[in-house]
Image (spheres, rainbow, N blue to C red):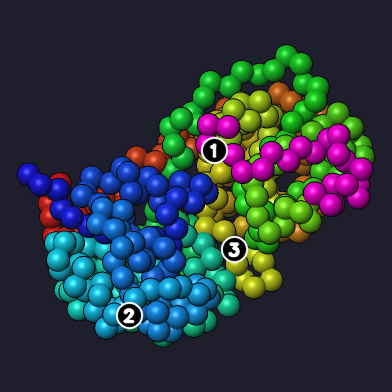
Amino acid sequence: MAKPKIALASPNQNAISETFIHAHRDCLPFDVDYLHSGFSPLYSEKNGYIGLSQWQLKKSFPFIGKVNLPLHASYDDVLTAYIKRHGIRLILAEYGLTGAEMMPACQKAGIPLIVHFHGFDAARRDMIAPYLDRYKDMFAYASSIISVSRDMTEKLIALGADPSKIILNPYGPHEKFRVSKKERLSRQPYIFLATGRFVGKKAPHLVIEAFHLAAERNPDIRLVMIGEGPLLEQSIQLVRSYDLGNKVIFLGKQDHDRVLAEMQKADCFVQHSIVDGNGDSEGTPVAILEAGLAGLPVISTRHAGIKDVVIEGKTGILVNERDITAMSEAMIDLAQNPPKGFDMGQCATHHISQNFSLQKHLDILTRAIQDALGDSHV
């Protein structure tokens, strides 16, 4: 029996941080056509260039930048024709903005739309503002809306989503992060690991500020930071200003195997997520799920989906956003009592594996797609 054809529409082709989208593309039990390039997808990995009007593209998404494309009738008409020509039965839109762009073509082609929100698309005011009217139409048309945290669900309802259409479906880490972590006999130095994009909502500078306070009292600690982004250079300069060059290591962007290797060497995972000035916030950070599955205690903030993942005092320590003093105290606590952190990490592995598996996430999404298609099985 042939698998149903669906299209997965995503802004990016292979963003290393978007492990959840890679899993949707590669692991969902459907014949998946992957459309990508900006919030208005232009290219199919199976069928090549789709083709869109420059005028329509710039009107729909003005901050996508200058493009040189041949003129066509309209964005919606081109996508509608593509959907019909290739027998696509449903579109799974990654991010709300993508869903808003996909909705008219889905409506014209008479196929269902499922929209998977991830974070900024439910929170960042400057990005959402031009899409508010289209969000309302999209919420009305969509078969279901996927949320990754309880906080996000509340935001989506406030934006106008029908609560009965919202499916809470947190991410799950890849099974490769389930490793047998042994307690180190030698604890010098005690290693904190931070991995993620250097952007406002992840506040890498606040991790450094907290680490600086902790290192003043406990010089035998180290911080390893993985990732890149607009705040990387600022973070490097902050480390230099505190003369922490021998204690903080920047590894830049790394693949998942290297991240896993660093988690195996580390003693604790740390991330200071905040609501940024423009309203941007996390969904449920995949790195925290991965760290927990890998046996690391987590020090983080009471922010968005992190509260759903970390059990305070059992699998990690949570502090209020921007409270670097409390975060530094948590760092000192675990560095001075390594067995406590190790026990938390063991609890985290059990908790994540039981409640946030990748397969569970995929199963819930698969059922939502089957329901929208009216198929009892695939």
Asked where in the image residue 147 lies, by quadrant, the reply is: bottom left
- Residue at which label 1 appears: 255
User: Which region is colored magenta?
Assistant: 236-258
Where is residue 237 drawn, in percent x and y? 84, 52
Cβ–Cβ below 8 Å for labels 3 and 2?
no
1 and 3 marks in contact (CB < 8 Å): no
Total of numbered circles in the picture? 3
Q: Residues within 10 Å of mark 2 (few under 14, many from 20)?
A: few
Quickly name the residue at label 2: 71
Residue 248 belongs to magenta span: yes
- Indicate the position of residue 21 as horizontal and vertical percent values: 40, 51
Q: Tell me if I can see residue 167 in this picture.
A: yes
Is label 2 or label 1 in front? 2
Report crowding for label 3: few under 14, some 14 to 19, many 20 or more residues within 10 A (C-alpha).
many
The kind of residue on which mark 3 rests is Ser
**Residue at 40%, 47% in the rendered image:** 22
Picture layout, residue 344 above or below residue 72 = above
Of residue 148 and residue 208, the one placed in the foreground of this image is 208
Position of 109 with respect to 56 (left or right) is: left
